[in-house]
Image: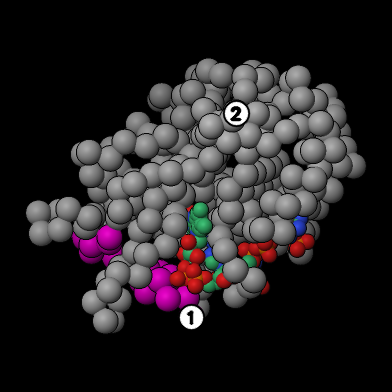
Amino acid sequence: MNQQINPDLQTVTAVTHWTDRLFSFRVTRPQSLRFRSGEFVMIGLPGDNGKPILRAYSIASPAWDDELEFYSIKVPDGPLTSKLQHIQVGEPIILRPKPVGTLVHDALKPGKRLWFLATGTGFAPFASLLREPETWEKFDSVVMMHTCREAGELAYGRKLVEDLQNDPLIGELVEGKLHYYPTTTREESRYTGRITDNLANGTVFADLGLDGPLTAERDRAMVCGSLAFNKDVAAVLEGFGLEEGSNSAPADYVIEKAFVGDGI
Ligand SMILES: Cc1cc2nc3c(=O)[nH]c(=O)nc-3n(C[C@H](O)[C@H](O)[C@H](O)COP(=O)(O)OP(=O)(O)OC[C@H]3O[C@@H](n4cnc5c(N)ncnc54)[C@H](O)[C@@H]3O)c2cc1C
Ligand SMILES: NC(=O)c1ccc[n+]([C@@H]2O[C@H](COP(=O)([O-])OP(=O)(O)OC[C@H]3O[C@@H](n4cnc5c(N)ncnc54)[C@H](OP(=O)(O)O)[C@@H]3O)[C@@H](O)[C@H]2O)c1
């Protein structure tokens, strides 16, 4: 067993390829690993020189799951994902078991309606939080906005949302509370447009039949996307009167980067 040789090694148990640039995989979970749904860890593979290549990854599975799930980009010449995209069931990956992050319920004040705002692989922490009972116990409703360039990139999120309704643990909690709003920006689909625009111009409220705009009394938000997206969404949320929170000072919204860098 990998874990007996090196306690940071876990074994891949499943791999699913969603598009030519997106895949998800599951690995064994160290018995000692405790985390809060929404947090991230460092994972990786051994490099050619023997030194591990480690990167931050949101844990996409909820805290109660026996295994850990990750949702990943494939960067063609990326030091980690050019290799990680070829990972097979039974192979080892390195996992440093020190979870951290701000996309956690502890960093938000109580509210009525919770907004999950994600672009691209920024969906990963919400794949965890959507399956977390605390999400449904704490809020009357949850709006999941996920935006990608093309419709195919929404597939992982769409399947997860569909499976939620049939989940033996979460299905009943979710009933009538989840509003899913997937949009595309470079291809026609049922809903289109950037999250920033759809929030600011009221399209999402009209399309879903929700009360708008956001208010600091009622609404809380968690944001995960590129740096530019995070910055622009923060400005929209601040415009509605929401204030940024953290683990040490809970408030109305929290933000995490989905990746660092300026483009593939
Ligand atoms: C807090 C945090 C959480 C993260 N969680 C995830 C996650 O759950 N899933 C995931 O796929 N990545 C996640 N990342 C990004 C991840 O750490 C790596 O950057 C990614 O796996 C690519 O690694 P690499 O070594 O192949 O390329 P890198 O050298 O790390 O990246 C090369 C370039 O690819 C682009 N890029 C990197 N990651 C992404 C991405 N996710 N989406 C679009 N473009 C990207 C950037 O422009 C970057 O400059 C997270 C990053 C941070 C900071
Ligand atoms: N997605 C692909 O098919 C694809 C393929 C090959 C390479 N790449 C490269 O991969 C990198 C990451 O691409 P990505 O598609 O994962 O992420 P991305 O460029 O961050 O785009 C993801 C989604 O976020 C939207 N968005 C981007 N900036 C925003 C902002 N400031 N405010 C509101 N919404 C914003 C985009 O809308 P807009 O479309 O309006 O920008 C898009 O719908 C890019 O450098 C890209 O060149 C992407």
Q: CA distance from mark 2 to mark 1?
A: 39 Å
Q: At label 2, which amino acid type do we have?
A: Pro
Q: Quick one: which residue is furthest to the right in this view?
A: 201
| Quadrant of the frame with the C terminus | bottom right
Q: Which residues are magenta?
A: 77-94
Q: Within 8 Å of ligand 1, the CB of disc 1?
A: yes
* Residue with the mark numbered 2: 250
Q: Position of residue 235 (x, y in %)?
A: 80, 45
- Residue at image x 35%, y 70%? 53
The tag on residue 77 is: 1
Q: At label 1, which amino acid type do we have?
A: Asp
Residue 201 falls in which quadrant of the image? top right
Magenta stretch encompasses residue 88: yes
Where in the image, quadrant-wise, is ligand 2 located?
A: bottom right
58 versus 88 height, above or below:
above
Q: Nearer the viewer, mark 2 or mark 1?
A: 2
- Observer able to see residue 111: yes
